[in-house]
Amino acid sequence: MNIIDFLKNSVNNYPEKISLIFENNSFTFNELWKSVEKFSSSLSSLDLQDVVSLMAENSSSFVIAYLGIINSGKIVHLIPPEISESNLLEQINSSNSSAIICSNNVFTKILEFSSIKIPILQFDKITENTDDSIVEFKTNEIAYLIYTSGTTSVPKGVGITHSMVEFTTKNITHVLKYTQSDIDVLPLPLFHSFGLGCLHTSLFNGSTLVLLKNANDLQKILDTIKKYNATTLAAIPATLSKFLQFNKNNLMDSFSGIRLIITNSTKIPISTTQKFKKICFN
């Protein structure tokens, strides 16, 4: 089973169910799959090699591009948008990436990087001049390539296989009891493994993913949880600790439907855990 199978299975089981919400846009599982297929078909005409870099902020376009690259049989090289020119060049060379696919904001930034010689492609431009023909692709064994930050040494790339993603996603689902009825709020970046794992889990279970740009606007996160009657939230410990500055009654109201808060990346203070237990489960 591969990541694209996660989506296909949810399309078969819940074709008209909302799969993804981002700002004012929403996609049913069927609509998301059609967008992914179109993106994959567009890539096929570009004659790109095995590795394609993806460099963008959270958006529905990121999700479509990520899945579209995988569906086209290529490996996604995930790059943080805030990366330095030297770090980007190092990753491009070591991954042997054949192109960078990016958002409009990132496109403007990396055009100034004179050292980058591979094609730089914008999301919207890729699907502009394509037909609607469906192309069958062979899935690569490796799903994506992710690098260490490079703050203390040369960045090191790790190739993540589909089988590794399947194993991890099934374990997460079993332990945390995710189901298709969950509504998952995700303010974490998709270009990091934590956020990406949450995307995989939503696709695998057929739940609805409400994607936010970032975790900077805490009030927006709370409003989103309440607006969509969310049942799960993924956030790093620092974000959860910051929430405790809000009025307790307001937090209890916003988190009243939350059954699960998942956190990662570093140790969470015991006091934060204890306070959230009182907020969510009292």
Image (cartoon, rainbow, N blue to C red):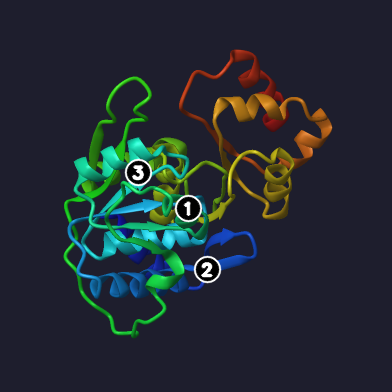
Foreground mark, 1 or 2, reads 1
Q: Residues within 10 Å of mark 3 (few under 14, many from 20)?
A: many
Q: Amino acid at mark 3?
A: Thr
Q: Quadrant of residue 111?
A: bottom left
The disc placed on residue 27 is 2
Badge 3 is on which residue? Answer: 169
Q: Do tag 3 and tag 2 residues touch (Cβ < 8 Å)?
A: no
Question: Vertically, is 177 above or below 20?
Answer: above
Amino acid at dot 1: Val
Q: Is residue 3 above or below residue 13?
A: above
Q: Residue 155 at x, y = what percent?
A: 29, 30
In this rendering, would 132 be left or right of 138? right
Residue 281 visible in the displayed image: yes
Are discs 1 and 3 less than 8 Å apart at CB? no
* Residue at 46% over, 42% down: 195
Q: Nearer the viewer, residue 256 or 140?
A: 140
Q: Residues within 10 Å of mark 2 (few under 14, many from 20)?
A: some
Quick one: label 1 or label 3, which is nearer the N terminus?
A: 1
Crowd around label 1: few <14 · some 14–19 · many ≥20 (10 Å): some
Estimate the spatial distance between the alpha carbons at disc 3 and disc 2, rounded to whole Å. 22 Å
As drawn, 122 above or below 215: below
Residue at 51% x, 69% y is 28
Position of the C terminus, as image quadrant, is top right
